[in-house]
């Protein structure tokens, strides 16, 4: 009985690939998604920077929360560059993203790797290690923006 039910659910899901293929209703939706993801990355990155510079009180648990968020957030924007209607130069997204896509994706990958390294450093609670890993993580923003973001 259970098997039968799962079987019929699978049929239902595979029968609607147009909806299942993307989380976005159109290109504009995908652009919003990636820009919102970048904004969340900015908030979490900025707060870590403020803590490390002493602008706000250092708090290990808060740092950990920011870093854990960044590990997930840094995986998000890229899908929003792939769908129809969101895959050409628009706003701050330069045409090079698609004409030199391998380099773009490699820079996106580096951000994700650096986020994981920052997470590992945060777990040591050693501020020198955290600072070094944060500088490395932070460097990825400029490295990509210089080539792929309009301003
Ligand atoms: C692999 C490339 C890449 C990396 C790495 C990257 N960005 Fe971006 N970022 C972009 C592109 C491209 C845009 C423009 C997106 C658009 O307008 O659709 C952008 C846009 C933004 C925006 C503006 C979003 C909006 O509301 O329009 C912010 C803020 C931002 N990035 C912050 C960051 C921060 C902080 C980092 C590093 C921790 C970072 N980005 C790393 C490519 C990147």
Image (cartoon, rainbow, N blue to C red):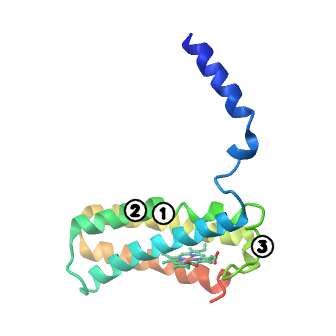
**Residue 99 in the image: x percent, y percent?**
79, 74
Q: CA distance from mark 2 to mark 1?
A: 6 Å
Badge 2 is on which residue? 69
Residue drawn where x is 25% and y is 75% of the image: 127
Q: Residue at (63%, 25%) from the top-left corner?
A: 9
Quickly name the residue at label 3.
88
SS at mark 3? loop
38 on left or right of 69: right
Crowding near the residue tagged with mark 1, few <14, some 14–19, many ≥20 C-alpha atoms within 10 Å: some
Cα distance in 3D space between marks 3 and 2: 28 Å
- Tell me which residue sits at (33%, 76%) in the image: 48
Residue 49: image location, x then y, percent = 34, 81
Q: Which residue carries the number 1 mark?
A: 73
Say if disc 1 is inside 8 Å of ligand 1: no
- What is the quadrant of the C terminus in the image? bottom right
Position of 147 relative to 76 (above/below): below
Q: Quadrant of ligand 1?
A: bottom right
């Amino acid at each position: 009985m259970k098997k039968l039910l799962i079987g019929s659910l699978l049929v239902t899901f595979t029968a609607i690939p147009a909806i299942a293929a993307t989380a976005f209703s159109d290109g504009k939706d995908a652009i919003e998604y990636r820009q919102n993801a970048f904004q969340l990355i900015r908030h979490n990155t900025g707060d870590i920077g403020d803590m490390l510079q002493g602008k706000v009180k250092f708090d290990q648990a808060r740092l950990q929360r920011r870093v854990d968020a960044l590990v997930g957030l840094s995986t998000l924007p890229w899908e929003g560059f792939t769908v129809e209607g969101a895959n050409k130069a628009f706003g701050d997204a330069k045409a090079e993203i698609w004409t030199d896509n391998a380099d773009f994706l490699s820079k996106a990958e580096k951000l994700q790797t650096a986020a994981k390294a920052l997470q590992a450093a945060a777990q040591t609670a050693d501020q020198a290690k955290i600072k070094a890993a944060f500088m490395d993580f932070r460097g990825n923003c400029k490295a990509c923006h210089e080539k792929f973001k309009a301003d």
